[in-house]
Amino acid sequence: MTLTLEDVLAAQARIASGIYHSPCPESIPLSEIAGCQIFCKLDYLQRTGSFKERGARNALLLLDEEHRRRGVISASAGNHALGLAYHGKLLEVPVTVVMPKFAPLIKRATCQRLGANIVLHGESFHEAYQHARSLADESGLTYIHGFNDPPIIAGQGTVGLEILEQVPDVEAIVVPVGGGGLVAGVALAVKSRAPHVQIYGVEPQRSAGFAASLAAGQVVSIAGQPTVADGLAVSQVGDLAFDIAKQRVDGVAAVTEEELSLAMLRLVELEKSVVEGGGAAPLAALIAGKLPQVAGRRTVIILSGGNVDPLVLSRVIERALVTDGRLCRFTAVVPDRPGGLARLTQVIAESGASIEEITHDRAFSGSDIGSVNILCTVETSDRQHLDELHRMLKREGIRTTPLPFPEDPPPAGQSGGR
């Protein structure tokens, strides 16, 4: 099926009464650190916390009376499930969501509160998807794909129409990419009305399926790794979404876990916005210099979702502080005699750093019984401050060894893609 601008315009009119027309303000602090004039499309302010509501409502409203009575089904562990559940309740359409067993408890509980029937099945998103397809065939339910269904893509495209209204002189739009539904819809809408506007996609390095498909010239399956951008973690982009996006997207960038975490921290600190990893991906690419094409240009970043588990958020912030040089853990070797520890803490205090935690380690300090290892966790203002602390300790003859942050990513489940 071929989608057109008319499909997106029809979706915009169809869903208008039930979707929040999210603001798109300029961000001066983000512009200062990114090197371009940034406007933030705040679609994480939708009722269920993501843009997914747009496509979900559009797909539900396009059902005929018989299919609405029977209900719909989908496989999702996150935002698509929430969007379907919420608008299914508003429109009185029964919704069944098949979630893999690893689905976060908070999202399972929220979907149930919104009236959806939750089925837990499988150890992966693919297994949940296959089971949902089987249930659809057995029960006569309509399957609504999270990112490769024409009404879904058309609904997501309304984000692009709103951006053109809110920032009429926009020069570039940066979109998070998972399954491809959002970037396909936005690219279709924007390029149809303003072909000069550049569209860039951003995906996590650990799940870079869109870039792999572009390189191959066709949709390919990848073996992704867990990522803090769990909403973008899909093994394969949608074929319809890819066909729409591949001719309209001007480039794609991949971002690391550290870059994603740092972008989430910047949004909390500078914009007072709690945005999930996938939603923070566009900013991550900009502040990491991954999209030099937009330097100095009027650029909209789509903050697509804000559903992040508080425990994961705390871990992400801690990781970002390490990346930013504001939190450091190191071992220091000091003489095991009165005054040794006092001198260490004195130097740290003189540097202006703050001790968060300190621990003696005598048993594993090596063969020198006259010395002791001190494990220190300190807070500093930035990396320059941290470097100065280490120089001061070295001048005092205190040997230090920085300890890296553990490499394992925060726990995250696949939530069905952008």
Image (spheres, rainbow, N blue to C red):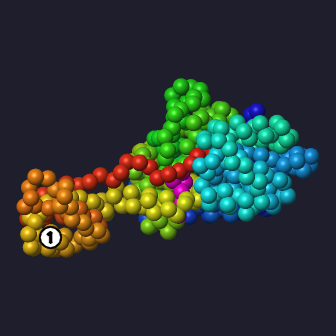
Q: Position of residue 121 (x, y in %)?
A: 68, 44
The question of residue 275 being in magenta is answered with: yes
The percent position of residue 400, horizontal first and vertical second, equals 17, 57
Find residue 198 and report its horizontal and vertical position in percent.
Answer: 54, 44
Relative to 74, residue 374 above or below: below
Q: Quadrant of residue 50?
A: bottom right
Q: Residues within 10 Å of mark 1 (few under 14, many from 20)?
A: some
Of residues 171 and 322, which is closer to you in this image? 322
Q: Position of residue 207 (x, y in %)?
A: 51, 40
- 397 displayed left or right of 95: left
Can I make out residue 149 in this image?
Answer: no
* Residue sitting at x 59%, y 49%: 102
Inspect this view and state whether residue 237 appears. yes
In this view, the residue farthest toward the front is 363
Residue at 41% across / 51% down in the picture? 259
**Residue at x 88% of width, y 47% of height:** 70
In the displayed structure, does residue 96 sit left or right of residue 333?
A: right
Residue under the image location 77 percent in, 60 percent down: 115
Q: Secondary structure at mark 1?
A: helix
Q: Nearer the viewer, residue 2 or 204?
A: 204
Q: What's under tag 1, amino acid-wise?
A: Leu
What stretch of residues is rendered in magenta? 274-279
Numbered label tally:
1
Does the magenta-highlighted stretch encompass residue 139? no
Please indicate whether residue 110 sits to the left or right of residue 253 in the image: right
Question: Dividing the image into 4 quarters, which one contains the N terminus?
Answer: top right
Quickly name the residue at label 1: 341
Residues 193 and 378: in front is 378
- Establish if 390 lies above or below 202: below
